[in-house]
Image (cartoon, rainbow, N blue to C red):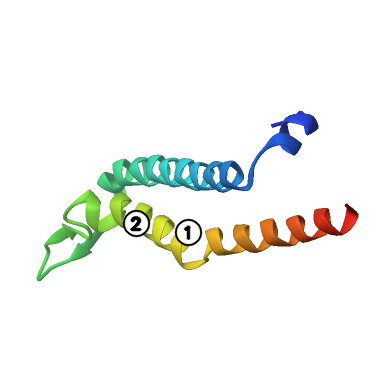
Amino acid sequence: MNDFSEINRMTLYEYNMRMTAFRLKQADREYEIHLQAWMNREIKAKREAGKNKLVFVYKTFKQFFDLEKRVRGIMQAEEKTGVNMKSQGIYNLMKKQKERRL
C-alpha cells in the first residue's frame, strides 16, 4: 500500500487481516525455498548407515519442512498475541479521546 489516504481509511480489523495474510504469504515463500532445498538434497543430504552404506537424512519432505505445522504456528501466534484485545483497547482509547474533544 502506497496511498496514505487508503491507509488512513483502513480499519484495525483490516490491518490485522492484512498482517495475517502477509505472514501466510511468507510461509508460502518459505515453503518454496525449502522445496528447492529438498530437490537439492538428492545430491548432498546423506548419512552413513552401517558399513559402506549411505541413506538420506530425511525420508519425506514433510520431515524436512512441515507447511501445515508452520501455518498452524502462525495462526496460533495470532490468537495468543490477543490482537483483538489490543485492537479493542486502541478503539476504546480513540473513543475516549473523541468524547473529550466534544
Which disc, if any, is residue 72? 2
The amino acid type, in three-letter code, at marker 2 is Arg
Which disc, if any, is residue 90? none
In the rendered view, does 73 fall on the left or right side of 86? Answer: left
Which residue is pictured at 75% across the width and 38% down the height?
Answer: 8
Closer to the eye: label 2 or 1: 1
With respect to residue 22, does 57 lie above or below?
Answer: below
Q: Earlier in the sequence, mark 2 or mark 1?
A: 2
- Residue 36 occupies which quadrant of the picture? top left
Q: Residue furthest right?
A: 101
Position in image of residue 74 (x %, y %): 43, 56
With respect to residue 78, does 3 lie above or below?
Answer: above
Q: Secondary structure at mark 1?
A: helix
**Residue situated in front as seen by the camera: 55 or 73:** 73
Quadrant for the N terminus, please. Answer: top right
With respect to residue 53, does 36 lie above or below?
Answer: above
Which residue is pictured at 74% across the width and 62% down the height?
Answer: 93
Q: Is residue 45 visible?
A: no
Q: Is residue 79 visible?
A: yes
Q: Secondary structure at mark 2?
A: helix
Q: Which residue is mark 1?
A: 78
The amino acid type, in three-letter code, at marker 1 is Glu
In the rendered view, does 16 fall on the left or right side of 8? Answer: left
Q: Residue furthest front?
A: 102
Position in image of residue 75 (x %, y %): 41, 56
Which residue is pictured at 10% across the width and 71% down the height?
Answer: 50
**Residue situated in front as seen by the camera: 95 or 57:** 95
Specify few, some or many for label 1: CA neighbours under 10 Å numbering under 14, 14-19, or 20 or more: some
Specify few, some or many for label 2: CA neighbours under 10 Å numbering under 14, 14-19, or 20 or more: few
In the rendered view, does 98 fall on the left or right side of 19? Answer: right
